[in-house]
Each structure stands twice: as C-alpha cells, then as structure tokens.
Image (cartoon, grey):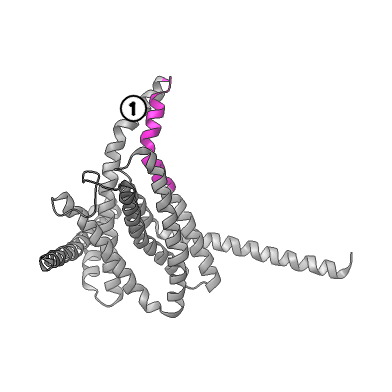
Amino acid sequence: MPTGLVALLDDISVIAKAAAATIDDVGVAATKAGSKAAGVVIDDAAVTPSYVTEFTPDRELPIIWKIAKGSLKNKLLILLPAALLLSQFLPWAVTPLLMLGGLYLCFEGAEKVLEKLGGAKHGETLGDTIGDMGEFERERVSGAIRTDFILSAEIMAIALAEVADEPLLSRALILAVVGFVITALVYGVVALIVKMDDIGLHLAQKPSAAAQRLGRGLLRAMPRVMAFLSGVGTLAMLWVGGQIVIHGAHELGLHGPSDLIHAAAHAVEDAAGSLGGVLGWLTNAGMSGVAGLVLGGIIAMALHKAQALRGKGAH
C-alpha cells in the first residue's frame, strides 16, 4: 500500500479517535450540566399539563407538540446563541436578565393564586364565553411557550454555569445536547401524563379483569392527578421565580434575603436529624415561594391598578 495512503488512513484514525473522545466528553458534561437543572425540569413538567387540562382529548397531543416545538426553538434558536454571546461578551448581564425572568414567573404564579381566591381572571378558561376556539388554543399555546421560555432560560443558565470553563464550541455542543434531551424528556412525560386517562379507558375495555381494574383506577385517579399537577405547577412558578430573584439579588450584593433563607434551612436541617435534608430543602423552597408570591402579588396588583386607571381614562 502506498505510504501516502497509509499516512492518510493514520490521520483519519487519529481524527476519528479525537472526535469520539470529544463526543464522550460532551456527553459526560451534558449529563452533569443537565442533572444540575433537575429541579427546574421537574417544575417545567409540572407546569405544562395545566395548559391542556380544559381541552378535548383529541387536541391534547397536538397542543403538547406545539408547545414542545416552541420550547425547542426557545432553547436552540434563542437562548443558546444568547447564552453564548452573553457569556462571551456581557457576562454581567446574565444575572439581571434572569431576575426579570424570575419576576415574570412570580407574576404568573401570583395571578393564578389570585384567580383561586376569586380575583380577576388571568386569561380565558372554558368556563368563559369563547368566540373562537382556535384563537383560544393559540393563546394557551403562546402562554405556555412564554412560561417555558423563562424555565428554559433558567435551565440553560444553570447548564452554562457548569460548563463556563469549556471552549466556546464545546459549550455550544453541550448546551444543545442539554436543550434537546431535556425538551424530549419533559414533553414526553407531559404527553404520558395527559393521555393516562385514555390509557385507563383502553384498559377498562379489555377482557382481563385485572386490566379492567387498573383502567378504572387510572380513570378515577387522573382528574385528581391533573388537579394536583396544576397546583404543583403554580407553586413551582412561585418557588423557582422567587429563588431566581433571591439568588440574583445575592449575586448583585443584596445578601439579606438569601442569608435569611439559608440560615432558616440550616436551622431546620440541624434540628430535624435524619429528615434534615428533606425538611431543610422544603424550608428553602417554601420561603422562596412565599417571596415569589409577595413579589408576584405586588406586580399583579400594580398591573391591575394601571389597567383600571387606563380604563377610567378611556371613558
């Protein structure tokens, strides 16, 4: 074999080994970065089912697919380039932007709480008179994608923090892998959750007595599960939003709220013994959620007041 061809094959072999090693490194780094964002991923999965609970079964999966596509665009076409540019040229801007996103989550969560307490409704529900069902669906999908944008921004920011020391190309590949895998995971789980009642109906019609019992059990349980997830989604908005704002304030030099929450969580951990880890986390999450509710409530009431004044001015 000519020596030139042998040298070429050797070069190709070296390149292939280097590429394989790079892929392995990206996979390991993406797994590590994605695991750090697990809490926000759970919140994302809890929030999304609330956007399809009031639609007919035939529209559930198409709506989830629309939201999933919007989520992927959020992560790969908007947040990924923005994260790379900001980390490269304006790293100081990341924290304030995340705090704005956190305030939006607080506002969304507080609006839902106000609705439950009998306040002004935030958007339409099927209990309202709906002139155009297609427009209603578009508004729901748009709202879900806006909320996903904030949660996705937090996921990408957490992942970025874990790979900040990587070269630019590796950073981009890792964030792309994290964005794609997390989107597939979240919306795959959401699709399974919202179609569980259909699975129950299918099992209930099987000839097997065991399958029928399981199917009837799923049918009875799913309305409660969906209502529970809707509540968890609201709490998640307040918890994650409050946590983002408090952490951002700490990064900007306002340490009081963060120090108070961490001190309370450590005190609970020390006092609770073997349950200290769980109860300490719950303390942290609960206090962050209360802070989110207060912040979101202030924003919601200010916006409602401004809308009322604008309405009076129009007359």
Quadrant in the picture for residue 222: top left
Give coordinates of residue 98: x percent, y percent: 33, 69
- Residue at position x 45%, y 50% in the image: 185
Quadrant in the picture for residue 104: bottom left
Looking at numbered disc 1 in the image, what kind of residue is underneath it?
Arg
Q: Which is nearer the eye, 236 or 197?
A: 197
Is residue 161 something that shows in the picture? yes
- Determine the residue located farthest toward the front in the rendered image: 315
> From the viewer's perspective, is residue 265 above or below residue 275?
below
Q: Is residue 61 left or right of residue 233?
A: right
Category of crowding for the residue at label 1, using alpha-carbon neighbours closer than 10 angstroms: few (below 14), some (14–19), many (at least 20): some
Asked whether residue 231 is drawn in magenta, I would say no
Quarter holding the N terminus is bottom right
Question: Which residue lies under the disc numbered 1?
Answer: 216
- Residue at position x 60%, y 65% in the image: 22
Give coordinates of residue 117: x percent, y percent: 14, 50
Quadrant in the picture for residue 307: bottom left
Q: Which residues are magenta?
A: 188-208
Give coordinates of residue 249: x percent, y percent: 27, 73
Q: Which is nearer the eye, 182 or 298?
A: 298
Task: Tell me how many marks there are.
Answer: 1
> From the viewer's perspective, is residue 249 above or below residue 111?
below
Q: Is residue 140 left or right of residue 291?
A: right
Helix, strand or loop: magenta stretch: helix
Give coordinates of residue 281: x percent, y percent: 28, 56
Asked whether residue 204 is drawn in magenta, I would say yes
- Determine the residue located farthest toward the right in the rendered image: 1
Q: Which is nearer the eye, 183 or 157?
A: 183
- Residue at position x 21%, y 46% in the image: 129
Quarter holding the C terminus is bottom left
Q: Secondary structure at mark 1?
A: helix
Is residue 279 something that shows in the picture? no
